[in-house]
Amino acid sequence: MSQTEVSGMKATLVPLATLIGRELRSEKVEKPYLKYGQAAVAKKGEDCFLIKTDCQRTHSNPSTSFSVFAIFDGHNGISAAIFAKENLLANVLSAIPQGISRDEWLHALPRALVAGFVKTDIEFQQKGETSGTTVTFVVIDGWTVTVASVGDSRCILDTQGGVVSLLTVDHRLEENEEERARVTASGGEVGRLNVFGGSEVGPLRCWPGGLCLSRSIGDTDVGEFIVPIPHVKQVKLSNAGGRLIIASDGIWDALSSDLAAKSCRGLPAELAAKLVVKEALRSRGLKDDTTCLVVDIIPSDHPVLPPTPMKKQNILASLIFGKKTRNSVNKRNKLSSVGVVEELFEEGSAMLAERLGKDSTLDANSGLFRCAVCQVDQPPVEGLSVNSGPFFSPASKPWEGLFLCAKCRNKKDAMEGRRLSTPTVILW
Ligand SMILES: [Zn+2]
């Protein structure tokens, strides 16, 4: 692509610096409209989805509204998918402090998503059921989009310049070397299915359990190294808006991100979702549950759909935005370089302590600490901070640093392959 063409593309976009500048000068930036559509064809009947457009950051204050769109692709039954659909949002919101500003709320959201995913997993496992589910969970607040995901359902962003980018990471053992190393280090075995005669078939799986995914909610019977800790990415769109396509692997096994975006450009969201599903079925047949949500984030002064972008811009996009497989990538990277989207946050580590920060929450009035995962208040003697190991030294203070209750601390150790062989130490 020539320099002239690149410059030409930039000229059609609203520069992000302009948008930020307006906000800094306290000029009112209108909230975008959301238009959305959903389509699904079931094979096993284990996909669920959630659309909730009436959420509020502050109770009874419509000006603090935000929306949630999510897909849950269940396996070995549908109960984990249904449980996550019914409980995950509340668990995420319970981990965000009350009475904070919008900026603070958006800043707290990635950490709260991690806590909410882990809490939901612990609660489901306590039910003693064996199914599991992927989760791709999208929070849209104004122009800011935050995506948390475990498993291989995917969320892509198609922006007006024709730039298609992946907002999730596929947690598939076959395709993710970093996850294979983590599972093996935590005590799992990674290999293919052995059939009669000793030949290996199918994708890489982890054993015990034989799951192809390295992260999920549920899966009590598989092993704690299959963790519920999500990859989280937060981006801010320019006021040109964009389209999100959220779908289960029934779509992505048939269509690349670019093809899915291209197959429905210029069409209203409802029709677009149907067309993406139809296109996937046409190319691969009905091999799996196939669910698709399309969400258009549209400028309020621009109620018509953006025109179909030029073909050459799509080629540029596919060159710039190759599929990422790393769990942790540099923040503020490629997307922002074309002025379409600002990357605010991205983190994919499976280590809970890295995701929840170092600070404990102490209620000055009650003297109680709050567990960073399940949000239960406890005196420090009932739990342990992550700083204290199984061989607690009386010289150190166990409640300094991130505080987890005994149950969540036990979960953390189990996920890292270090479950204590004795019950959690109660101090004093
Ligand atoms: Zn807890």
Image: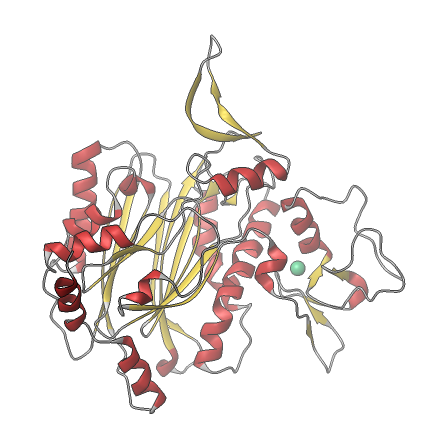
Residue 339, quarter of picture: bottom left
Residue 309, quarter of picture: bottom left
Up the image or down, 354 lies above or below 100; here it is above
Residue 352, quarter of picture: bottom right
Up the image or down, 159 lies above or below 289; here it is below
Please tell me which residue is depicted at 17% across the width and 42% down the height of the picture.
Answer: 278
Q: Position of residue 330 (x, y in %)?
A: 45, 60
Please tell me which residue is depicted at 26% across the width and 48% down the height of the picture.
Answer: 257
Quarter containing the C terminus: bottom right
Q: Position of residue 55 (x, y in %)?
A: 39, 71
Judge left or right: residue 299 versus residue 336. Answer: left
Judge left or right: residue 312 versus residue 158. Answer: left
* Colouring: secondary structure
412 or 131, which lies in front? 412
Q: Position of residue 69 (x, y in %)?
A: 34, 60
Quadrant containing ligand 1: bottom right
Judge left or right: residue 223 versus residue 380. Answer: left
> From where the camera sits, is residue 200 visible?
yes
Up the image or down, 163 lies above or below 256; here it is below
Please tell me which residue is depicted at 47% across the width and 83% down the height of the picture.
Answer: 101
Q: Position of residue 293 (x, y in %)?
A: 27, 54
